[in-house]
Amino acid sequence: MNKQEAKERIEKLRKEINYHRYLYHVLDRQEISDAANDSLKHELAKIEERFPEFKTADSPTQRVGGRPLPGFKKIKHGSPMLSLNDVFTEEELRDWEERIKKLVTSYQLPATSLDYFAELKVDGFAISLIYENGIFKTGSTRGDGKIGEDVTENLKTIESIPLRLHDPKEFSKEKEVREIFKKFPRVREAVSKIPGIIEVRGEVYMTKKSFEAVNKEQEKKGLPVFANPRNIAAGSMRQLDPKVAASRRLDFFAYDLVTDLGQKTHEEEHLIAKLFGFKTMDLVRRCDDLGEVMKFFREVGDKREKLPFLIDGVVAQVNSGDIFERLGVVGKAPRGAVALKFPGKEATTVVEDIIVQIGRTGVLTPVAVLKPVDVGGVMVSRATLHNMDEIKRLDVRSGDTVIVQRAGDVIPDIVKVFPNLRPKGSREFRMPRIFCGQKVVRREGESAHKILYPERCKLVVHEKFYHFVSKHAFDIQGLGPKIVDRLIEEGPVKDPADLFLLKESDVAPLERFAEKSAENLIRSIQEKKEIELPRFIYALGILHVGEETAIDLAGNFGTLEKLERASFEKLNGIMNIGPVVAQSIYEWFQEPRNKELIKKLLKVGVNPKSYKPPTTSHKLKGMTFVLTGGLESMSRDEAKARIRAWGGDISETVSKKTSYVVAGSDPGSKLKHAQKLGVKVIDEKEFLQLIR
Ligand code: IVH
């Protein structure tokens, strides 16, 4: 491919990828599979890597998240980023209208012309985006409303934010676009050319699904979970390393067009944003009066639980841009808009105690024991306090009156403490220094407190059992925590292997255990003896080994015996496994009591089936590669993936067993070492031939 060909191909690919982004995020349609889309991006990235002179900031490849920033620059907002006043009832909403109607009449504008635009109040994080000549230039947080932080690099990782404005002319064939143009000539005019500058504001948020996925990962890794999607969205935006934002699958809704492109209503602003390629909400409504706004609010309330993201109400805004402007600002909120909030899934109560719970990895989580309170229809008597940092941030103590919040299925959370309602003589919470008879430690840079030898703590043993039988591990039906507790306390079960030795006569005598259910339980335990290797590995509950890592391990080693014997270097050489995880796995298999457990599991008939990852071919089977120096045509991770896809292995260190050392540009000491040992060294070109 020569330069000219590369340039043309790059342009075509970008256009195609942008088209599918627009379809997916803006029009909610999908013409090609995710895999096909990824493949297009992959090709583009490869050509750009070979011809870096054609790399541009608006290329779809620029979403991966570049280098960490040393700090955030400040950005001054062209106009202040405001907040909204809340109303909770129809009456308050009518009061608001009355106030603005008076003002509107005094402007000698016809008050009868007042109509409203209602949209969702998404529970996320406000962001302002600036485009220059159609290219995304900067994005910033609200900050104090006047000055925000430059979070451009983090925002670039969000696919629903266009890196280049979409040219609506290209899609005027689309029926939807044609209809908008017909009904809204001003919108057609506004998007007829790409403006020199445009500012769009909106909300970065996270879907409920992504939120659960992130928390599940956290949990599996033995890390503290996040309280709600908004915290992750906000937290990810404030990370200096864009890779964090990239990994969190964030999303963006545009709800405001700040620049004057001739639009006259808020409704038109939404449409213009949409046509320029921003994701806007589908659930919006232009309303002739407040009756319609209330109807919309109730409808949204009914749909709320089913929406894929969290909302905390509806925003109602005077639709006319002129009137909205004239109404001005009081304090930090515009007069022309209000947030109509759902009756709070919040309530106040008293913290009766702060206790500490331990998880299966030995992490201690402080939990507030609450005076039971109804929060949006559910009785809440506990709230997680996450860790010491969170306790310090809230400054919560036993005896405090607090606000508890319950958002969706999220664990109840304390959001605020009333310091003035604090009883005299209350004392700060301290993490116990000893827990389960052991010293409690907090490693540098970690937010969690842990005990050093979790396996020696009875509570941890119970937690590990729950994990062992859980859905993604052995998946033993009918073996909930309560029964596990009784089997350990009253029955003959000392470790998970004992489960497979249980007989009906062991279970039936347990109090309140019917004969039938004893029989069923034994059967479902016995049925699970044949188990897939990834599940088996996951069930072991090794620190940092979640489901994904278990699959990677199974795929790399194929059998349990090989995994047991794996060296640290070998583990560390696996893609997606870093030194911390490798060390944790290595140590786990070295520990005599774990060795015993595995031996016993096999002895009682548990049979982890050998596992083959879905590979394309095995032409590199049995070969071990060591990579050193940079490759031009692909990243190191990609090279590893390619080797693995052909059945080869990767190691970080050169030994006599190494089949090939692949030496890229600026190779390190590994090259010298290879030469000394007489290991074959190949360059990138030879490597490419091997993996072709
Ligand atoms: S309009 C003029 N519309 O709510 C004020 N805000 O309390 C601009 N929010 O900071 C806000 N969804 O973070 C508006 N559809 C929506 C919104 C929305 C969420 C947030 C936004 C803002 C806060 C106002």
Image (cartoon, grey):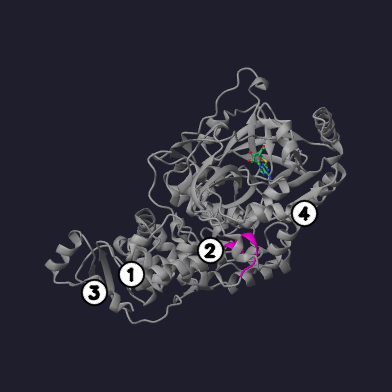
Q: Which amino acid type corresponds to the residue marked 2 in the rendered image? A: Asn
Observer-side mark, 1 or 4, equals 1
Q: Which amino acid type corresponds to the residue marked 3 in the rendered image? A: Ser
Q: Is residue 562 left or right of residue 306?
A: left
Percent coordinates x, y for residue 614 in the rendering: 46, 77
Q: Give the mark, 1 or 4, whose residue is nearer the N terminus.
A: 1
Give the residue pinned by disc 3.
Answer: 659
Q: Is residue 441 above or below residue 332?
A: below
Give the residue pinned by disc 2.
Answer: 18
Q: Is residue 94 visible?
A: yes
Q: Which amino acid type corresponds to the residue marked 4 in the rendered image? A: Lys
Q: CA distance from mark 3 to mark 4?
A: 59 Å
Report the residue at 67% width, 67% height from top.
174
Q: Write down the region rendered in magenta.
A: 22-30
Q: CA distance from mark 1 to mark 4?
A: 53 Å
Query: Does the closest atom of ligand 1 sit within 8 Å of the Cβ of label 4?
Result: no
Q: Give the mark, 2 or 4, whose residue is nearer the N terminus.
A: 2
Give the residue pinned by disc 1.
Answer: 3
Q: CA distance from mark 3 to mark 1?
A: 36 Å
Give the residue pinned by disc 4.
Answer: 303
Q: Report helix, strand or loop for mark 1.
A: helix
Q: Is residue 548 above or below residue 402?
A: below
Task: Choose between 471 and 193: the one closer to the eye.
Answer: 193
Observer-side mark, 2 or 4, equals 2
Q: Which amino acid type corresponds to the residue marked 1 in the rendered image? A: Lys
Q: Give the mark, 3 or 4, whose residue is nearer the N terminus.
A: 4
